[in-house]
């Protein structure tokens, strides 16, 4: 049987984006070469500030078309001072337009330690941070950020400004199903923690009701609970393991909690993310890949761009998420994660103990990429 062909669009972006994306591309190419079952076809397109410089817009029509036709998208970081708040054209509207066009409504952000040898880098005490393993599933295109608003200085009542948080039953149902599918993919299934502010907000009371009904009716094998967002924020600092599993929440709360939880591993350079247009792909013979955009959570870091010192691990782990969630390729995704762990683990436990500058080390972007690629070959 001919290998299944997957089309992946690569958006290197700005600043350190091209450097870290290059290492993730090498990892994906290694995966593809080692397989007789599938073939990853990667193609690069301009997006963000670099696209503004060459075409005058952050999301050229050719890039958007390629993304719409792709099975998945791997992105670096975009933006920088050159295209800041006072610029006539900025990269950020291009990202919003891409998310909207592709219908990327589910943001997935894991927060865990890629290696226990990194415990000392966490701002939390080692005994608190050890064993933390949570996945934040955030509704991405609804709620307060997308509701009607009024700025100060406009009629009526020029001295007031307001925003509205609106959610529909259908919006809550679909994000709940994404969280449930992620929970079910683990063995044993993960617990789901739904986060809201149901003691105050009407939209949160709808959220809690719909989450409960959907999980009880459609996923009776899963366990779940509800937490108020202020309580959840305290748990993430004082006892984060209480929220191990899948954290399911709406846009504003998810924005805050995913950033808060991302501090636990000790460096933003280590963490991946995904934005999906549906539930993760199931690895069946005739499945259709779930459209998704994958990127590290760090910014473009223009201050270190071109120096070859950026940490590519967040982008490499984003590539692992791409394989898992869009292409249904769990085995190679796990192989990437094992290779990363081997490179980060200290020699005392059989690892290489490599550290980039953000972790106080001197290993460069390409060198750590080289080592991950070599270790990866041992796990395929």
Image (spheres, helix red, strand yellow):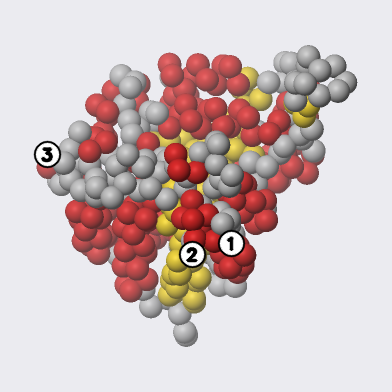
Give the mark nearest the N terminus, 1 or 2: 2
| Mark 3 crowd level (few <14, some 14–19, many ≥20, 10 Å Cα) | few
Q: Quadrant of residue 137?
A: top right
Residue 272 in view (yes/no) = no
Query: For this view, does 109 lie left or right of residue 364?
Result: right
Q: Residue at x 72, y 37 (%)?
A: 146
Give the position of the C terminus as an image quadrant. bottom left
Q: Label 1, label 3: how many angstroms apart (C-alpha)?
A: 50 Å
As rendered, which of 297 and 233 lies closer to the eye? 297
SS category of the residue bearing label 3: helix
| Mark 2 crowd level (few <14, some 14–19, many ≥20, 10 Å Cα) | some
Q: Residue at x 28, y 23 (%)?
A: 126
Query: For this view, does 343 lie left or right of residue 292?
Result: left
Q: Which residue is mark 1?
A: 60
Give the mark nearest the N terminus, 1 or 3: 1
Q: Label 1, label 2: how many angstroms apart (C-alpha)?
A: 9 Å
As rendered, which of 271 and 85 lies closer to the eye? 85
Asked if residue 332 is positioned above or below residue 204 in the image, the reply reads: below
Q: Label 2, label 3: how many angstroms apart (C-alpha)?
A: 42 Å
Q: Which residue is mark 3?
A: 348
Give the mark nearest the N terminus, 2 or 3: 2
């Amino acid at each position: 049987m001919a290998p299944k062909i997957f089309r992946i669009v690569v958006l290197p972006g700005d600043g350190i984006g091209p450097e870290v994306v290059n290492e993730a591309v090498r990892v994906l190419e290694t995966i593809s070469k080692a397989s007789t079952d599938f073939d990853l076809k990667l193609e690069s397109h301009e997006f963000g500030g670099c696209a503004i410089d060459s075409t005058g817009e952050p999301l050229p029509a050719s890039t958007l078309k390629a993304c719409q036709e792709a099975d998945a998208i791997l992105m670096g970081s975009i933006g920088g001072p050159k295209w800041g708040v006072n610029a006539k054209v900025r990269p950020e509207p291009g990202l919003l337009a891409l998310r909207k066009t592709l219908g990327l409504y589910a943001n997935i952000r894991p927060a865990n330690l890629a290696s226990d040898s990194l415990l000392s880098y966490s701002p939390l005490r080692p005994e608190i941070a050890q064993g933390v393993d949570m996945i934040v599933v955030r509704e991405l295109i609804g709620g307060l950020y997308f509701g009607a608003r009024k700025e100060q200085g406009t009629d009526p009542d020029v001295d007031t400004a307001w925003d509205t948080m609106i959610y529909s039953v259908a919006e809550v149902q679909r994000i709940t199903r994404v969280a449930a599918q992620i929970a079910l993919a683990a063995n044993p299934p993960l617990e789901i923690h739904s986060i809201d502010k149901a003691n105050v907000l009407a939209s949160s009371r709808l959220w809690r009701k719909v989450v409960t009904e959907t999980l009880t009716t459609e996923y009776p094998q899963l366990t779940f609970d509800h937490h108020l967002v202020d309580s959840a924020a305290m748990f993430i600092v004082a006892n984060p393991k209480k929220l191990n599993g899948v954290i399911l929440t709406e846009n504003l709360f998810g924005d805050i909690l995913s950033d808060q939880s991302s501090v636990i591993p000790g460096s933003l350079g280590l963490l991946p993310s995904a934005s999906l247009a549906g539930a993760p792909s199931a690895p069946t013979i005739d499945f259709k890949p779930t459209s998704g955009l994958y990127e590290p959570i760090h910014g473009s870091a223009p201050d270190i761009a071109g120096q070859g010192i950026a940490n590519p691990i967040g982008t490499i782990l984003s590539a692992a998420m791409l394989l898992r969630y869009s292409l249904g390729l769990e085995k190679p995704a796990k192989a990437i994660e094992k290779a990363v762990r081997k490179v980060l683990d200290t020699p005392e436990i059989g690892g290489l103990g490599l550290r980039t500058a953000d972790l106080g080390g001197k290993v460069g972007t390409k060198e750590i990429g080289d080592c991950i690629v070599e270790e990866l070959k041992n796990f395929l």
